[in-house]
Amino acid sequence: MTKAELSDRIYEKIGLSRKEALGIVEMLFESIKSILADGESIKITGFGTFLVRKKSARKGRNPKTGTELEIEPRKVVTFKPSLHFKALVEKV
């Protein structure tokens, strides 16, 4: 599903204009990105939790050449679904 399709669903269910619905979706995603970029987690009850985790440096291998190299420490975003959401997805 794309942002446009998501905003269309909001438009159909709530009755806002397409432009307003797209604006809401854009604002939501910008807020989520900003909060995660600051290193904070986001917990949405009934949906799940977005977490920023720090991965430490580690040794890796170039699959093409087999040369060992050092992988830099970095931050990654993970998502842990809520039990309710997980059960809903598994039911389908």
Image: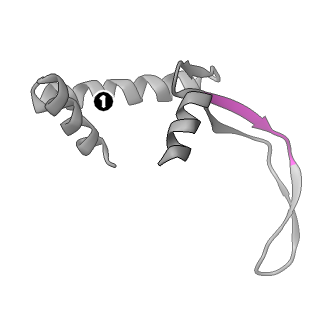
Q: Is residue 60 above or below residue 23?
A: below
Q: Report whether 82 appears left or right of 15.
A: right
Q: Identify the residue position indicated by label 1 in the image.
A: 25
- Residue found at x 57% / y 20%: 43
Q: Visible in this render: residue 82? A: no
In x, y percent, where is residue 89?
A: 51, 43
Residue, x 11% and y 24% (percent of image)? 15
Q: Main secondary structure of the magenta part?
A: strand
Q: Amino acid at mark 1?
A: Val
Q: With respect to residue 24, does 69 lie above or below?
A: below
Q: Quadrant of residue 56?
A: top right
Q: Depth check: 13 or 92 in front?
A: 92
From where the camera sits, is residue 35 visible? yes
Q: Is residue 56 above or below residue 62?
A: above
Residue at position x 40%, y 30% in the image: 29
Looking at the image, which is closer to me, 74 or 10? Answer: 10
Q: Is residue 68 above or below residue 81?
A: below
Q: Secondary structure at mark 1?
A: helix
Front residue of this view, candidates 15 and 3: 15
Image coords of residue 2 (percent x, y): 31, 47
Q: Which residues are magenta?
A: 50-57
